Image: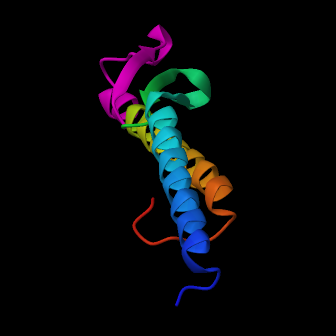
Amino acid sequence: MFPGGKKGMKDLMKQAQKMQQDFAKAQQELADKIIEAQSGGGMVKIEMNGHHELKSLKIDAEVVNPDDIEMLEDLIIAAFREAHEKIASTSEDEMSKLTGGMNIPGLF
């Protein structure tokens, strides 16, 4: 028999259901959050949402040099990497708050 009997089982199920709702809410909030990232001292700036969708790309005119396209490409890639890292870190931090620091496989 389950410790606490039927009442204990019902309470546990309610807690699990609330936790599931909290996770769904947190995941939606993360998906809607806009993360800003930059490279080249702010010469390339991007905004990305929690679904890793690009929402905005700004390139400073000073970095646009037809003779050095490679540098611009590298700056854009660096800004994307920073945004992805920020999203992963933000997601991990938010979910960790809900799980009390427990690592639950498949959650992140």
Q: Which residue is drawn at 45% across and 44% down?
A: 24
| Residue at the extreme top | 61
Where residue 75 appears, as percent x and y from the top left, is 44, 33
**Quarter-wise, where is residue 55 in the image?**
top left
Quadrant the C terminus occupies: bottom left
Where residue 39 appears, as percent x and y from the top left, is 54, 32
Q: Residue at x 55, y 85 (%)?
A: 2
Q: Is residue 95 left or right of residue 79?
A: right
Where residue 90 appears, as percent x and y from the top left, is 59, 45
**Quarter-wise, where is residue 12 in the image?**
bottom right
Q: In this view, does 66 lie to the left or right of 1?
A: left
| Residue 43 is one of the magenta-drawn residues | no
Q: Which residue is drawn at 55% across and 43% down?
A: 86
Segment colored magenta = 52-73
Where residue 67 appears, as percent x and y from the top left, is 31, 22
Of 98 and 9, which appears nearest the observer?
9
